[in-house]
Image (cartoon, grey):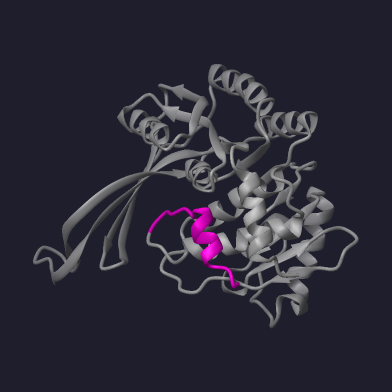
Amino acid sequence: MTITRKRAAELLKQCEGKRILVIGDLMIDRYIMGSVSRISPEAPVPVVHVHKEKAVPGGASNVALNIGSLRGQGGVAGVMGDDADGRELAELLGRRGVGTTAAVIDEAIRTTVKTRVIAERQQVVRIDWEDSFEYSASSLSRLEQRLEEEIGASDGVILEDYGKGVIIQDVVDIAIAAARRKGVPIGLDPKDNHILNVEGITLATPNRKEAFSAAGVPETRPAGHPLEDAAVLKVGDILLDKWKPELLMITLGGDGMLLLQRGKKPIHVPTRAREVFDVSGAGDTVIATCVLACAAGASFVEAAEIANYAAGVVVGKLGTATCTPEELLASMPE
């Protein structure tokens, strides 16, 4: 099945104003961009002459930006530090229209910041500022209360796990139960080696590595066409039985996506990327677009195909990026 541009336009129109709550690790992505013309005399490293700096919301925050870029209404739930970076993140999100009423401020932690130094479109180094995070009884209680309230006013929910500590079993249980009561789709973008009971989710979008890890199966190399890759098909069956999602969408990088549903034949959706500059954030775009489209009335296959086109747009951009409806439609054939 291949979605038409006309049908995609109809669904994107229906996405407008849909409220999606993104629960997960909130952080800032900083970029220091410049050029390199010499090696340092102090050490065998390049000297980057800085031309530009920028900061954008990252992690789960970037998923919410993707929702807003497609003209949905994104909100975030998680924990930020009571520090300058946390205040900057809240301001950056506010400027982009992302709701932060479900974000808890905890003075005991520092806000995660990932700084990338980029020279001539090549990443030279990444510097991470982060602490190991564990909830205090107070911050967990406040977050759980806000989740109940926010999900009750939402059209969809996303669990965005970057493995920093926000997504724990208690949070997952509350989110799934609240989404079920409201009758809205809930999606999971998992983190490899983080075992959670997520039975009851609507859809999950692991990449190949994450899928093998979650299934407890050693990862193999891709073997030919995805529909003939026995290892990844076996992993898909394991996760369908373990997570019981209505849709399992395993992203395969340059090989596109594999869609699996219980009792149905697997579907392969080939990649739509025309040119790849940077794959960072592509998974954020996939889960954001897929859940938003489902909330707007798309079938699972339609949602996956729209998400695939959106991912093809963002990998053609440098750094953490988003996709607009106009860019998505322009990337589709007539």
Q: Give the magenta range.
A: 319-334
* Residue 317 image position (x, y, % from top left): 41, 63
- Residue 330 among those drawn in magenta: yes
* Residue 63 image position (x, y, % from top left): 53, 45
Image height of 174 relative to 120, above or below: above
Extreme residue toward the right, this view: 263
Image height of 160 relative to 78, above or below: below
The N terminus - image quarter: bottom right
Q: Residue at x 66, y 62 (%)?
A: 6
Q: Nearer the viewer, residue 168 or 227?
A: 227
* Residue 275 image position (x, y, % from top left): 46, 73
Q: Nearer the viewer, residue 18 or 47?
A: 18
- The reply to whether residue 145 is visible in this rendering is yes
Relative to 105, is 209 on the left or the right?
A: right
Q: Residue at x 63, y 45 (%)?
A: 15
- Predominant secondary structure, magenta span: loop
